[in-house]
Image: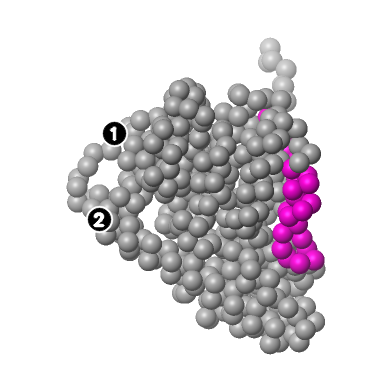
Amino acid sequence: MNAPHSPSLLAAVPMAPKDPILGITELFVADQNPGKVNLGVGVYYDENGKVPLLECVRRAEQQRVQSGAPKPYLPIDGLQAYDQAVQALVFGADAPALKDKRAITVQALGGTGGLKIGADFLRLLSPGAQVWISEPSWENHRALFEGAGFKVGTYPYFDPATRGLRFEPMLAALNGLPAGDILVLHSCCHNPTGVDLAPEQWQKVLAVVRSRGLVPFLDLAYQGFGDSIDADAYAARLFAGAASPVFLSSSFSKSLSLYGERVGAFSLVAGNADEAARALSQVKRIVRANYSNPPTHGSDIVARVLTTPELRTLWEQELGGMRERIKAMRKALADGIGKRVPGADWSFVLRQNGLFSYTGLTKAQVERLRAEYSIYAIETGRICVAALNAKNIDYVAEAIARVLR
Protein backbone atom coordinates (compact mmCIF):
# COMPACT_ATOMS: atom_id res chain seq x y z
CA MET A 1 0.00 0.00 0.00
CA ASN A 2 1.39 3.38 -1.00
CA ALA A 3 2.22 5.87 1.71
CA PRO A 4 0.00 8.97 1.69
CA HIS A 5 1.40 11.80 -0.38
CA SER A 6 2.73 14.58 1.80
CA PRO A 7 3.17 18.17 0.63
CA SER A 8 6.65 19.12 -0.52
CA LEU A 9 8.80 20.86 2.03
CA LEU A 10 9.25 23.60 -0.57
CA ALA A 11 5.60 23.90 -1.57
CA ALA A 12 4.94 26.99 0.51
CA VAL A 13 8.22 28.80 -0.19
CA PRO A 14 7.32 32.25 -1.59
CA MET A 15 9.14 33.84 -4.51
CA ALA A 16 11.53 36.45 -3.17
CA PRO A 17 11.38 39.94 -4.67
CA LYS A 18 14.07 40.80 -7.18
CA ASP A 19 17.09 42.71 -5.99
CA PRO A 20 16.36 46.35 -6.87
CA ILE A 21 19.77 46.88 -8.45
CA LEU A 22 20.22 43.53 -10.20
CA GLY A 23 16.64 43.80 -11.45
CA ILE A 24 17.53 47.07 -13.16
CA THR A 25 20.47 45.37 -14.84
CA GLU A 26 18.21 42.63 -16.21
CA LEU A 27 15.96 45.26 -17.78
CA PHE A 28 19.00 47.08 -19.15
CA VAL A 29 20.43 43.94 -20.76
CA ALA A 30 17.11 43.20 -22.45
CA ASP A 31 16.81 46.75 -23.85
CA GLN A 32 17.57 46.87 -27.60
CA ASN A 33 18.30 50.61 -27.70
CA PRO A 34 21.98 51.03 -28.75
CA GLY A 35 22.12 54.30 -26.80
CA LYS A 36 21.04 52.77 -23.48
CA VAL A 37 22.86 53.77 -20.29
CA ASN A 38 22.93 51.85 -17.00
CA LEU A 39 23.33 54.22 -14.04
CA GLY A 40 22.07 51.65 -11.55
CA VAL A 41 24.93 49.27 -10.75
CA GLY A 42 27.53 50.42 -8.22
CA VAL A 43 30.61 49.58 -10.26
CA TYR A 44 33.42 51.80 -11.51
CA TYR A 45 33.52 51.99 -15.30
CA ASP A 46 36.31 53.62 -17.27
CA GLU A 47 35.95 56.20 -20.03
CA ASN A 48 35.06 53.41 -22.47
CA GLY A 49 32.27 52.09 -20.27
CA LYS A 50 34.28 49.01 -19.23
CA VAL A 51 35.27 47.60 -15.85
CA PRO A 52 39.04 48.21 -15.91
CA LEU A 53 41.81 45.74 -15.22
CA LEU A 54 44.29 47.90 -13.35
CA GLU A 55 47.88 47.71 -14.51
CA CYS A 56 49.08 47.17 -10.95
CA VAL A 57 46.78 44.15 -10.69
CA ARG A 58 47.93 42.78 -14.06
CA ARG A 59 51.57 42.98 -12.97
CA ALA A 60 50.87 41.42 -9.57
CA GLU A 61 48.99 38.54 -11.20
CA GLN A 62 51.88 38.04 -13.61
CA GLN A 63 54.29 37.84 -10.69
CA ARG A 64 52.13 35.26 -8.96
CA VAL A 65 51.82 33.07 -12.04
CA GLN A 66 55.55 33.25 -12.73
CA SER A 67 56.34 32.29 -9.14
CA GLY A 68 54.61 28.95 -9.63
CA ALA A 69 53.42 29.11 -6.04
CA PRO A 70 51.16 26.26 -4.87
CA LYS A 71 47.67 26.92 -3.53
CA PRO A 72 47.29 25.21 -0.17
CA TYR A 73 44.56 26.10 2.31
CA LEU A 74 45.07 29.49 3.89
CA PRO A 75 44.80 29.91 7.66
CA ILE A 76 41.28 30.56 8.92
CA ASP A 77 42.00 34.28 9.23
CA GLY A 78 43.55 34.46 5.76
CA LEU A 79 46.88 35.41 4.26
CA GLN A 80 48.92 37.07 6.98
CA ALA A 81 50.68 39.50 4.60
CA TYR A 82 47.24 40.60 3.42
CA ASP A 83 45.81 41.07 6.91
CA GLN A 84 48.80 43.15 7.98
CA ALA A 85 48.67 45.27 4.82
CA VAL A 86 44.96 45.93 5.36
CA GLN A 87 45.59 47.11 8.91
CA ALA A 88 48.29 49.52 7.78
CA LEU A 89 46.09 50.87 4.99
CA VAL A 90 42.99 51.35 7.13
CA PHE A 91 44.43 52.42 10.49
CA GLY A 92 47.80 53.82 9.40
CA ALA A 93 51.14 52.03 9.57
CA ASP A 94 52.09 53.78 12.83
CA ALA A 95 48.71 53.50 14.53
CA PRO A 96 48.95 52.92 18.31
CA ALA A 97 46.32 50.18 18.00
CA LEU A 98 48.71 48.20 15.79
CA LYS A 99 51.76 48.82 17.96
CA ASP A 100 49.83 47.76 21.05
CA LYS A 101 48.42 44.68 19.26
CA ARG A 102 44.87 45.83 19.98
CA ALA A 103 43.74 45.43 16.36
CA ILE A 104 42.81 42.17 14.67
CA THR A 105 42.01 41.62 11.00
CA VAL A 106 40.73 38.58 9.17
CA GLN A 107 40.41 38.18 5.43
CA ALA A 108 36.76 38.13 4.37
CA LEU A 109 34.68 37.39 1.28
CA GLY A 110 34.39 40.99 0.16
CA GLY A 111 33.15 43.85 2.27
CA THR A 112 29.83 42.05 2.61
CA GLY A 113 31.64 39.10 4.17
CA GLY A 114 33.38 41.42 6.61
CA LEU A 115 30.03 42.83 7.69
CA LYS A 116 28.62 39.32 8.07
CA ILE A 117 31.50 38.16 10.27
CA GLY A 118 31.11 41.22 12.46
CA ALA A 119 27.33 40.86 12.66
CA ASP A 120 27.58 37.23 13.73
CA PHE A 121 30.21 38.06 16.35
CA LEU A 122 28.11 40.91 17.74
CA ARG A 123 25.12 38.59 17.96
CA LEU A 124 27.18 36.32 20.22
CA LEU A 125 28.38 39.24 22.33
CA SER A 126 25.21 41.30 22.62
CA PRO A 127 22.08 39.50 21.40
CA GLY A 128 19.73 42.05 22.97
CA ALA A 129 21.23 45.09 21.25
CA GLN A 130 19.55 46.93 18.40
CA VAL A 131 21.35 47.94 15.20
CA TRP A 132 20.98 51.42 13.73
CA ILE A 133 21.67 52.28 10.08
CA SER A 134 21.40 55.59 8.22
CA GLU A 135 18.24 56.62 6.41
CA PRO A 136 18.82 55.74 3.63
CA SER A 137 21.58 53.13 3.64
CA TRP A 138 22.92 50.38 1.44
CA GLU A 139 20.06 47.88 1.17
CA ASN A 140 22.20 44.96 2.31
CA HIS A 141 22.99 46.57 5.67
CA ARG A 142 19.47 45.87 6.90
CA ALA A 143 19.40 42.37 5.39
CA LEU A 144 22.77 41.41 6.91
CA PHE A 145 21.98 42.48 10.45
CA GLU A 146 18.39 41.22 10.39
CA GLY A 147 19.76 37.93 9.06
CA ALA A 148 22.06 37.80 12.07
CA GLY A 149 19.00 38.13 14.32
CA PHE A 150 19.06 41.85 15.16
CA LYS A 151 16.25 44.34 15.10
CA VAL A 152 17.32 47.18 12.77
CA GLY A 153 16.27 50.81 13.09
CA THR A 154 17.31 53.99 11.27
CA TYR A 155 18.72 57.37 12.20
CA PRO A 156 18.26 60.61 10.17
CA TYR A 157 20.89 61.21 7.52
CA PHE A 158 19.94 62.53 4.08
CA ASP A 159 18.13 65.82 3.55
CA PRO A 160 16.05 65.71 0.32
CA ALA A 161 15.67 69.50 0.33
CA THR A 162 19.41 70.25 0.21
CA ARG A 163 20.65 66.87 -1.08
CA GLY A 164 23.01 67.10 1.88
CA LEU A 165 23.32 65.89 5.46
CA ARG A 166 20.73 66.22 8.26
CA PHE A 167 23.51 66.40 10.80
CA GLU A 168 21.76 68.00 13.77
CA PRO A 169 18.77 65.58 13.62
CA MET A 170 21.26 62.74 13.21
CA LEU A 171 23.22 63.82 16.27
CA ALA A 172 20.04 64.25 18.30
CA ALA A 173 18.89 60.76 17.37
CA LEU A 174 22.23 59.21 18.30
CA ASN A 175 22.10 60.97 21.65
CA GLY A 176 18.87 59.11 22.37
CA LEU A 177 20.12 55.59 21.64
CA PRO A 178 20.44 53.09 24.51
CA ALA A 179 23.89 52.10 25.72
CA GLY A 180 25.22 49.02 23.99
CA ASP A 181 23.31 49.54 20.75
CA ILE A 182 25.24 49.10 17.50
CA LEU A 183 25.76 52.07 15.20
CA VAL A 184 26.58 51.37 11.54
CA LEU A 185 28.46 54.25 9.90
CA HIS A 186 29.70 54.79 6.35
CA SER A 187 33.32 55.89 6.66
CA CYS A 188 33.35 57.71 3.31
CA CYS A 189 31.54 57.87 -0.04
CA HIS A 190 28.18 57.11 1.55
CA ASN A 191 26.16 54.51 -0.34
CA PRO A 192 23.65 55.44 -1.73
CA THR A 193 23.71 59.23 -1.26
CA GLY A 194 27.33 60.27 -1.73
CA VAL A 195 26.90 62.60 1.28
CA ASP A 196 29.72 62.39 3.84
CA LEU A 197 30.49 63.83 7.26
CA ALA A 198 33.19 66.47 7.63
CA PRO A 199 36.05 65.79 10.10
CA GLU A 200 34.56 68.06 12.77
CA GLN A 201 31.24 66.23 12.41
CA TRP A 202 32.97 62.87 12.83
CA GLN A 203 34.50 64.17 16.06
CA LYS A 204 31.03 65.04 17.37
CA VAL A 205 29.71 61.60 16.43
CA LEU A 206 32.64 59.98 18.22
CA ALA A 207 31.87 62.03 21.33
CA VAL A 208 28.27 60.77 21.29
CA VAL A 209 29.40 57.17 20.75
CA ARG A 210 31.67 57.40 23.78
CA SER A 211 29.22 59.24 26.04
CA ARG A 212 26.30 56.93 25.17
CA GLY A 213 28.33 53.71 25.23
CA LEU A 214 27.44 52.78 21.64
CA VAL A 215 29.25 50.17 19.57
CA PRO A 216 30.48 51.65 16.26
CA PHE A 217 30.64 49.48 13.14
CA LEU A 218 32.30 51.33 10.26
CA ASP A 219 31.81 50.29 6.65
CA LEU A 220 34.83 51.34 4.57
CA ALA A 221 34.09 50.03 1.08
CA TYR A 222 35.35 52.97 -1.01
CA GLN A 223 38.66 54.06 0.48
CA GLY A 224 40.42 56.28 -2.06
CA PHE A 225 37.33 57.28 -4.05
CA GLY A 226 36.48 60.35 -1.94
CA ASP A 227 39.46 62.65 -1.34
CA SER A 228 42.48 60.36 -0.92
CA ILE A 229 43.46 57.06 0.66
CA ASP A 230 44.45 58.69 3.94
CA ALA A 231 41.66 61.29 4.05
CA ASP A 232 39.02 58.62 3.44
CA ALA A 233 40.37 56.64 6.41
CA TYR A 234 39.88 59.61 8.76
CA ALA A 235 36.88 58.16 10.59
CA ALA A 236 38.45 54.72 10.95
CA ARG A 237 41.64 56.17 12.41
CA LEU A 238 39.78 58.62 14.64
CA PHE A 239 37.61 55.91 16.18
CA ALA A 240 40.45 53.40 16.45
CA GLY A 241 42.47 55.92 18.43
CA ALA A 242 39.74 56.90 20.87
CA ALA A 243 37.11 54.18 21.26
CA SER A 244 36.83 50.50 22.09
CA PRO A 245 35.62 48.27 20.68
CA VAL A 246 35.51 49.45 17.05
CA PHE A 247 34.24 47.12 14.33
CA LEU A 248 35.15 47.73 10.70
CA SER A 249 34.56 46.12 7.32
CA SER A 250 36.65 47.02 4.27
CA SER A 251 36.86 45.99 0.64
CA PHE A 252 39.06 46.11 -2.45
CA SER A 253 36.28 45.41 -4.95
CA LYS A 254 36.19 49.02 -6.13
CA SER A 255 39.61 50.42 -5.26
CA LEU A 256 41.48 47.64 -7.10
CA SER A 257 38.64 46.74 -9.49
CA LEU A 258 38.62 43.20 -8.10
CA TYR A 259 34.86 42.70 -7.95
CA GLY A 260 34.84 39.02 -8.86
CA GLU A 261 37.67 38.08 -6.48
CA ARG A 262 35.64 39.01 -3.37
CA VAL A 263 38.55 40.46 -1.41
CA GLY A 264 37.58 42.16 1.81
CA ALA A 265 38.36 42.17 5.51
CA PHE A 266 36.85 42.38 8.97
CA SER A 267 38.82 44.33 11.55
CA LEU A 268 38.26 44.98 15.23
CA VAL A 269 40.04 47.31 17.63
CA ALA A 270 39.89 46.13 21.26
CA GLY A 271 40.83 47.77 24.54
CA ASN A 272 44.03 45.79 25.00
CA ALA A 273 46.05 42.97 23.44
CA ASP A 274 44.45 40.28 25.60
CA GLU A 275 40.93 41.30 24.55
CA ALA A 276 42.05 41.34 20.92
CA ALA A 277 43.53 37.82 21.12
CA ARG A 278 40.39 36.40 22.69
CA ALA A 279 38.19 38.18 20.16
CA LEU A 280 40.26 36.78 17.30
CA SER A 281 39.82 33.24 18.62
CA GLN A 282 36.03 33.64 18.50
CA VAL A 283 36.00 35.37 15.12
CA LYS A 284 38.02 32.47 13.70
CA ARG A 285 35.38 30.04 15.01
CA ILE A 286 32.74 32.00 13.12
CA VAL A 287 34.78 31.88 9.91
CA ARG A 288 35.45 28.17 10.35
CA ALA A 289 31.75 27.41 10.73
CA ASN A 290 30.75 29.52 7.71
CA TYR A 291 33.33 28.83 4.98
CA SER A 292 36.33 27.33 6.78
CA ASN A 293 38.98 29.61 5.26
CA PRO A 294 39.20 32.23 2.48
CA PRO A 295 40.54 31.94 -1.09
CA THR A 296 44.12 32.69 -2.05
CA HIS A 297 44.29 34.48 -5.38
CA GLY A 298 42.71 37.85 -4.65
CA SER A 299 44.36 38.38 -1.29
CA ASP A 300 47.76 37.51 -2.76
CA ILE A 301 47.24 40.11 -5.50
CA VAL A 302 46.24 42.78 -2.98
CA ALA A 303 49.13 41.96 -0.66
CA ARG A 304 51.60 42.26 -3.53
CA VAL A 305 50.17 45.61 -4.63
CA LEU A 306 50.14 47.09 -1.14
CA THR A 307 53.60 45.89 -0.09
CA THR A 308 55.61 46.26 -3.31
CA PRO A 309 56.72 49.92 -3.59
CA GLU A 310 56.54 50.02 -7.39
CA LEU A 311 53.08 48.45 -7.49
CA ARG A 312 51.84 50.55 -4.56
CA THR A 313 52.86 53.76 -6.35
CA LEU A 314 51.21 52.59 -9.56
CA TRP A 315 48.00 51.70 -7.70
CA GLU A 316 47.79 55.08 -6.03
CA GLN A 317 48.20 56.74 -9.42
CA GLU A 318 45.52 54.57 -11.03
CA LEU A 319 43.14 55.02 -8.10
CA GLY A 320 43.72 58.76 -8.23
CA GLY A 321 42.86 58.72 -11.93
CA MET A 322 39.58 56.92 -11.23
CA ARG A 323 38.73 59.37 -8.46
CA GLU A 324 39.42 62.41 -10.62
CA ARG A 325 37.46 61.00 -13.56
CA ILE A 326 34.40 60.62 -11.33
CA LYS A 327 34.78 64.21 -10.12
CA ALA A 328 35.03 65.39 -13.74
CA MET A 329 31.80 63.55 -14.56
CA ARG A 330 30.09 65.16 -11.57
CA LYS A 331 31.04 68.60 -12.86
CA ALA A 332 30.01 67.76 -16.43
CA LEU A 333 26.62 66.53 -15.23
CA ALA A 334 25.96 69.56 -13.03
CA ASP A 335 27.06 71.95 -15.79
CA GLY A 336 25.10 70.08 -18.44
CA ILE A 337 21.82 70.19 -16.53
CA GLY A 338 22.36 73.79 -15.40
CA LYS A 339 22.89 74.84 -19.02
CA ARG A 340 19.75 73.09 -20.20
CA VAL A 341 17.41 73.96 -17.32
CA PRO A 342 17.70 77.61 -16.26
CA GLY A 343 17.39 77.88 -12.50
CA ALA A 344 18.22 74.22 -11.87
CA ASP A 345 20.99 74.10 -9.28
CA TRP A 346 22.73 70.74 -9.37
CA SER A 347 25.84 71.93 -7.55
CA PHE A 348 24.99 69.42 -4.80
CA VAL A 349 26.43 66.75 -7.11
CA LEU A 350 29.83 68.39 -6.70
CA ARG A 351 29.60 68.21 -2.90
CA GLN A 352 28.81 64.52 -2.87
CA ASN A 353 31.59 61.93 -2.93
CA GLY A 354 32.38 58.57 -4.48
CA LEU A 355 30.51 56.52 -7.01
CA PHE A 356 26.96 57.61 -6.15
CA SER A 357 24.66 60.59 -6.15
CA TYR A 358 21.21 60.90 -4.65
CA THR A 359 19.87 63.19 -7.36
CA GLY A 360 16.41 63.97 -6.02
CA LEU A 361 14.83 62.54 -9.15
CA THR A 362 11.38 61.17 -8.35
CA LYS A 363 10.20 57.65 -9.08
CA ALA A 364 8.08 59.00 -11.94
CA GLN A 365 11.07 60.83 -13.43
CA VAL A 366 13.23 57.70 -13.16
CA GLU A 367 10.52 55.72 -14.95
CA ARG A 368 10.42 58.33 -17.73
CA LEU A 369 14.18 58.13 -18.14
CA ARG A 370 13.89 54.38 -18.61
CA ALA A 371 10.79 54.37 -20.83
CA GLU A 372 11.69 57.30 -23.07
CA TYR A 373 15.49 57.34 -23.10
CA SER A 374 16.65 53.85 -22.04
CA ILE A 375 18.53 55.38 -19.10
CA TYR A 376 18.35 53.10 -16.07
CA ALA A 377 18.58 54.36 -12.48
CA ILE A 378 17.34 53.18 -9.09
CA GLU A 379 13.79 54.37 -8.37
CA THR A 380 15.07 56.34 -5.37
CA GLY A 381 16.92 58.60 -7.80
CA ARG A 382 20.33 57.19 -6.96
CA ILE A 383 22.72 57.09 -9.91
CA CYS A 384 26.22 55.72 -10.32
CA VAL A 385 28.25 58.71 -11.50
CA ALA A 386 31.11 56.39 -12.50
CA ALA A 387 28.92 55.04 -15.32
CA LEU A 388 29.04 58.43 -17.05
CA ASN A 389 31.66 59.16 -19.69
CA ALA A 390 32.39 61.57 -22.54
CA LYS A 391 30.28 59.48 -24.92
CA ASN A 392 27.06 59.48 -22.88
CA ILE A 393 27.22 62.55 -20.62
CA ASP A 394 25.44 64.92 -23.02
CA TYR A 395 22.72 62.36 -23.73
CA VAL A 396 22.15 61.75 -20.02
CA ALA A 397 22.18 65.46 -19.14
CA GLU A 398 19.68 66.20 -21.93
CA ALA A 399 17.38 63.39 -20.84
CA ILE A 400 17.43 64.45 -17.19
CA ALA A 401 16.80 68.05 -18.24
CA ARG A 402 13.73 66.98 -20.18
CA VAL A 403 12.20 65.04 -17.30
CA LEU A 404 12.91 67.95 -14.95
CA ARG A 405 11.02 70.47 -17.09
- Which structural element holds mark 1? loop
Mark 1 or mark 2: whose residue is earlier in sequence: 2
Query: Which amino acid type corresponds to the residue marked 2 in the rendered image?
Result: Gln
Q: Nearer the viewer, residue 10 or 359?
A: 359
Coordinates of residue 126 in the picture (x, y in percent): 65, 25
Mark identifier at residue 119: none
**347 to 131, vertically: above or below:** below
Q: At 75% across and 50% down in the image, what residue appears?
A: 170
Whether residue 229 is visible, yes or no, is yes
Coordinates of residue 389 in the picture (x, y in percent): 53, 76
Coordinates of residue 286 in the picture (x, y in percent): 51, 27
Q: At 68% across and 81% down in the image, what residue appears?
A: 337
Q: At 53% across and 34% down in the image, what residue appears?
A: 117
Residue located beneath label 1 in the image: 72
Whether residue 182 is visible, yes or no, is no
Quadrant, the N terminus:
top right
**288 to 20, vertically: above or below:** above
Residue at far top of view: 1
Instruction: Specify whether 103 is left or right of 331.
Output: left
Mark identifier at residue 62: 2
Asked where in the image residue 381 lies, by quadrant, the reply is: bottom right
Query: Which amino acid type corresponds to the residue marked 1 in the rendered image?
Result: Pro
**167 to 105, vertically: above or below:** below
Q: At 54% across and 68% down in the image, what residue appears?
A: 386
User: Few, some or many C-alpha atoms within 10 Å of disc 2 (few <14, some 14-19, many ≥20)?
Assistant: few
Coordinates of residue 324 in the picture (x, y in percent): 49, 71
Alpha carbons under labels 1 and 2: distance apart = 19 Å
> Is mark 1 in CB contact (under 8 Å) with mark 2?
no
User: Few, some or many C-alpha atoms within 10 Å of disc 1 (few <14, some 14-19, many ≥20)?
Assistant: few
Quadrant, the C terminus:
bottom right
> Does 152 lie within the magenta span?
yes
Q: Which residues are magenta?
A: 149-174
